[in-house]
Amino acid sequence: MIKLFIALIFLPIFTMNDNIKSGIFIWNNTTIEVPLNADLTPYLDIPYASLAEGYEDNSIWYEKNGVNYTFVSTINTSIVKSYKLYFRVHSPKYKKSSTVEITIKIVDNVPPKIIKMNPVEVPVGIKSIDYKKSISYEDNYDSLADLTLIVMDEHVNLNRVGNYPVWIKLVDLSLNETISEITVEVKDYLNPTVTEIKNPVLNIGEDHNLMTFYSIQDNYTVSLEINIDDSLVDYTSVGKYPFSIQVVDSSGNSTLYESFVEIMDNEAPLIFFSSGSQSIVLDTFFDPKSIILKVSDNHSKLTKEDVIIETDLDTKKVGYYDVVYTLMDHSNNKSEYIIELSVVDKEKPSVSSDKLVSSTVDIDLLKGVTCIDNTGFCEIRLVEHNIEDEEGIYQALYLVVDKYGNHTYHTRTIEIQKGITTSTNSHSYGAVIILGLSVLGILYFGLSYYMKRKQH
């Protein structure tokens, strides 16, 4: 009994609370659990028999080996298994015995052991994590293939950078378990990318936002830190200059992009004129440069003297002429303007006449009247007169027209010294006819001049 008491104190309690009554005996702890690889001997003292109430025998003894052909030697505590071993108790005082089946269970109560657990680092956006690559573990009895690894990572967001706690549960076939915590760090390993979308060329004076030439992207960060170093770029001078773009994402991944920007002068110079067209009086001097008010350029220093003028202008000939003004800056940008010039005759013909003295009204009134014009052509027309069949001083009105419609009226004095028989009515009708023909002639020459201008 002392031996049994010591076993109950110092051994783990691996018994089933079962009681079996057999005759005058009551069997206790007929099912016991023995830890794997433990010494079986002390555990054989755990099952015991007591006498029923009213019986007492201090000399009872046990048979624990060989009863019903079951032997202790067949029990291997290194194998998880249940064994049947029969015990027999004897009471010499009452000459009674009792045999009972004892169940001995070899059990594994040792949880699996995690040997090493490395922190887990994975790139953001990964689909899944193989935790077995970061964990080493073992078990005192079961093979690695028989162990169950349970990962509790429901709080891990693989699409967001950060540190996340993960619990690892390791369970063997005997349902012993170990729980440990591991940290999963979701990181962004990729650098931002800088891609040129068009050739970086800027015109002098143009808004110099170099970012319009590049596309910057990152796999994770939305708001990137972008720094442009264009300290060596002279945006006011033609040339090719180096610059750099540094992009940093929220994880500190950095990309340095180096390139060149070309500053060009693509803007043509300008010529400002006093008017878009010009009329020139026939036979007068005209300098085509005189209608240039100023020239300007966004980069080159130009003057009126840099303007090249081409024209077939002939100020001695009435007509329409084109003057081509060409201006080129130092970057070979060229502008061209065409101005229409018209050479016009605005000078009226001059008229002179002799005083006419006649004794009759039957006279040639155009005789003695002369005209001169700068074009070399003029026409004299009798408009009207007031000559009557009586002696007196009369006047005749003349219209002188050149071929461009310039005209002059001229009055001539006519003296009749003796009477004539021609009636006054006849002279009046003649004057009206002459006046009508003169007006038609003026309209004809005016229309001819208009048609010539329109053709030019």
Image: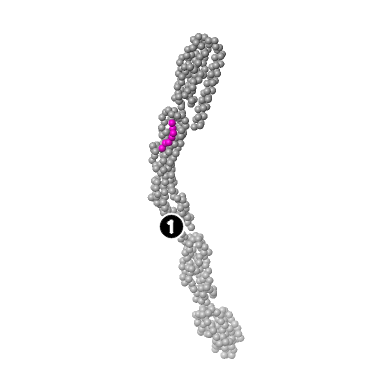
Q: Residue at x 43, y 56 (%)?
A: 255
Q: Nearer the viewer, residue 250 or 311?
A: 311
Q: Residues within 10 Å of mark 1 (few under 14, many from 20)?
A: some
Residue 111 in view here: no
Is 112 drawn above or below residue 294 in the view shown?
below
* Residue sitting at x 53%, y 18%: 434
The spot of residue 343 in percent (x, y) is 45, 30
Please give the range of residues in magenta.
308-314
Front residue of this view, candidates 143 and 334: 334
Secondary structure found at label 1: strand
* Label 1 sits on residue: 254
Residue 377 point in image, percent of width and height: 47, 24
Q: Position of residue 131 (x, y in %)?
A: 50, 67
Q: Residue 151, image x and y in percent?
A: 52, 67
User: Can you see residue 84?
Assistant: yes
Membership of 311 in magenta stretch: yes
The amino acid type found where label 1 is placed reads Ser
